[in-house]
Image (tube, rainbow, N blue to C red):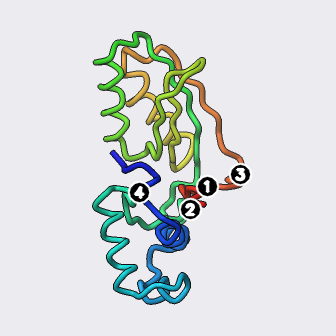
């Protein structure tokens, strides 16, 4: 669980804003931009990693470059909403590589998924293996992304 936002100050927020653009920015570069020493920046980054404020350092991959150009937004409605079945579905989605994001939501659906696929045939095979084989999925509705207008995980820190 992350620390409350009050545990970070303006310098931390500036560091986070820079790192969300590129986590390869050096401590020296960050220090010069925000007016701290490189050692102070390193200490702050280390502390924010320990507190899980910085949850991961990742590389964003071009889907087309790895032959997965299709993005699908899928609403899932479960047959039964028992806690153990919800937890089981969450675990399955976490362990399914084609599922980039999974949200347990309120409203007409139970879950919203962001899925990547090679093409529609690949997605159909996915639905048979993951959705149709799961007896607790009542229905799913797929939206095919025509244009990724904005994607990312950056969180406003100011």
Residue farthest top in this picture = 80
Disc sitting over residue 7 in the figure: 4
Q: Residues within 10 Å of mark 3 (few under 14, many from 20)?
A: few
Disc 2 and disc 3: Cα gap in Å?
Answer: 13 Å
Disc 3 and disc 4: Cα gap in Å?
Answer: 38 Å
Q: Give the mark toward the camera: 2 or 1.
A: 1
Earlier residue among tags 3 and 4? 4
For disc 1, the marked residue is 151
Q: Residues within 10 Å of mark 2 (few under 14, many from 20)?
A: few
Residue 100 vs residue 95: left or right? Answer: right
Q: Give the mark toward the camera: 2 or 4.
A: 4
**What kind of element bears circle 2?**
helix
Badges 1 and 3: C-beta atoms under 8 Å apart? no
Badges 1 and 4: C-beta atoms under 8 Å apart? no
Disc 2 and disc 1: Cα gap in Å?
Answer: 14 Å
Q: Position of residue 79 (x, y in %)?
A: 43, 11
For disc 3, the marked residue is 147
């Amino acid at each position: 669980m992350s620390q409350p936002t009050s545990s970070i100050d303006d310098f931390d927020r500036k560091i986070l804003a820079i790192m969300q653009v590129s986590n390869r920015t050096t401590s020296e570069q960050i220090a010069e931009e925000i007016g701290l020493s490189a050692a102070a920046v390193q200490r702050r980054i280390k502390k924010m990693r320990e507190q899980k404020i910085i949850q991961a350092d990742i590389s964003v991959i071009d889907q087309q470059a790895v032959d997965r150009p299709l993005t699908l937004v899928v609403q899932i409605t479960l047959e039964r909403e028992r806690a153990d079945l919800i937890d089981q579905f969450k675990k399955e989605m976490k362990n399914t590589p084609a599922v980039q994001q999974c949200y347990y939501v309120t409203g007409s659906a139970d879950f919203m998924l962001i899925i990547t696929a090679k093409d529609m045939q690949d997605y159909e095979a996915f639905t048979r293996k993951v959705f149709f084989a799961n007896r607790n999925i009542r229905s799913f509705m797929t939206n095919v992304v025509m244009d990724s207008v904005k994607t990312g995980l950056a969180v406003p820190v100011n």
